[in-house]
Amino acid sequence: MFNTFNFNEKIFAILFFILGLLLFFSSSASNLIFYLIAISSIVLIISTPQKRSIIIKEVLTNRLVQIILLWLILLYASVLYSSGDFILQCADKYKKYFLIPIIIYGIIYYREKNIHLNKLFLHGVINGGLLLFIMSISLKFSGLSQILLEKQYISYQKIINGGYIIPNDFFITSILYCIIFSYAIQLIFEKKFTKGIPLLSISIFMVTFVLIQRTGYIALLIMTICMLYNIIQSKKIKFITILLVIASLLSMQFFAKNILTERFAAIHNEYTQCSQALKNDANPNSKILQKSCSLSIGLRTLYIHDSIQQIKQSPIYGHGLGSSHILTIDTTNYDKGIFTTRYSLNPHNEYLLQGIQLGIIGIILLIIIFTLTLKTALNLKDSNRNILIGIVLVYIVSCLFNSFLLDAMEGIVFIMILSTIVAINLVEKKGKPT
């Protein structure tokens, strides 16, 4: 894969490949590789004076990059009036977004040399997904996962659904398998069945039976519709195919022991119980409130309630960076019926988080960032265009259920995807080979 590259190109290419692979396994290692990519880009900027001014001008005059930088400047400037408890934590989490123009520079430079770093990243994700699948299946069916748990070599949180091992957060792993899923569909439509069908089967199995999580199902559904809608040209076939795919995904609940039905029933019950408890008694020390809002959707109902109250207090420009002060319920001793309350930074909704920090201005800026990213992706001619569009749509929807731009791993993937979309768009505008 790397034989035709020179030494500098090999380093950059290997970093993209390793990042895609390590995202499945280690948050700290992925962060390290991400910052090494940024450092490599800075070295590239310094060492390429003949290209530097042209590419920097292209990047910094891009409207999407300008909006992101404006959002970041406003966030950090809001420290001047913020009195939140999480200022330093937020400042640390958001700092990586300043690296977007730098990473774009590196992707553009190599793209103009016809080196596709996005494909290397995709290959890393595919290899990481296959490795995790083999490891997880092997440990489950050999019984080693329970032995490792008993010996305390791994934590309980890493073993799910009767013995499968998932080293990282459920949602980021779901997104990565949805990328593999989309690539598999692309291969199948290119009649590369020997590669496409196994990848398709593995990705559906992992998201549906192992990563049993509502947001993962949403990501899988969005990617399915997006891929098939963009690949199939006939409008009539599009409509019929999308209906069949939706029906197929919903029918998977019967093979997964009615998992989907149980999940959606749980959503309704948890929301109803928490809403009623909030109406009757919004006191955070209320035992009824703590019990009624202690599960996933109940907690999110509580977060939405608290977030709206905070936004109402300063609706235009918000309370500043790190000012989110969300009541949450510690469910460590849920089985014993013991609940404790504390305050958290994360309202589990990126739009509400920006509303608390920057008010309506922050929400509008976030919507503009997502809209411009999607619009730019739709204009691409790249072979992986449909995958990039799907991932952007997944983030737009999934940010309703968690603050994924704040989270470390989800933020890194979004930065890499956004940087790739902007870089490819700028190169394609100049008519370079794609």
Image (cartoon, helix red, strand yellow):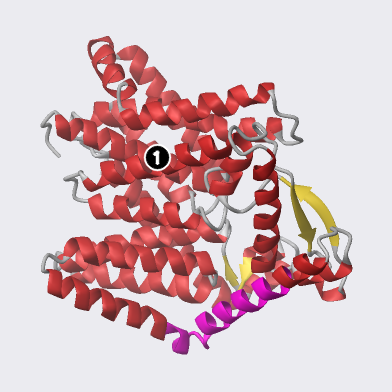
Q: Residue 74: percent from the left, percent from the top? A: 54, 26
- In this view, the residue in front, 255 or 347, is 347
From the image, tell me which residue sits under label 1.
Answer: 368
- Secondary structure beneath label 1: helix
Residue in the picture at 55% in, 78% down:
264
- x%, y% of residue 293? 74, 67
| Rendered view: 356 above or below 274 | above
Q: Give residue 151's quadrant in the image.
A: bottom right
Residue 48 x, y percent position in the rendering: 28, 14
Q: Nearer the viewer, residue 308 or 160?
A: 308
Q: Residue at x 13, y 74 (%)?
A: 236
- Residue 219 in the magenta stretch? The answer is no
Coordinates of residue 308 in the picture (x, y in percent): 65, 50
The C terminus lies in quadrant = top left
Range drawn in magenta: 252-274
Dominant SS type (magenta): helix
* Residue 426, above or below 156: above
Residue positioned 65% across, 71% down in the render:
271
Using the rendered view, name the quadrant where residue 285 is placed. bottom right
Residue 27 left/right relative to 100: right
- The image shows residue 365, relative to residue 382, as above or below, that is above
Q: Residue at x 32, y 67 (%)?
A: 224
Three-letter code, disc 1: Ile
Q: Above or below — where is 135 with respect to 78?
A: below
Q: Nearer the viewer, residue 329 or 183?
A: 329
Given the current orientation, which residue lies at the most extreme top position? 49
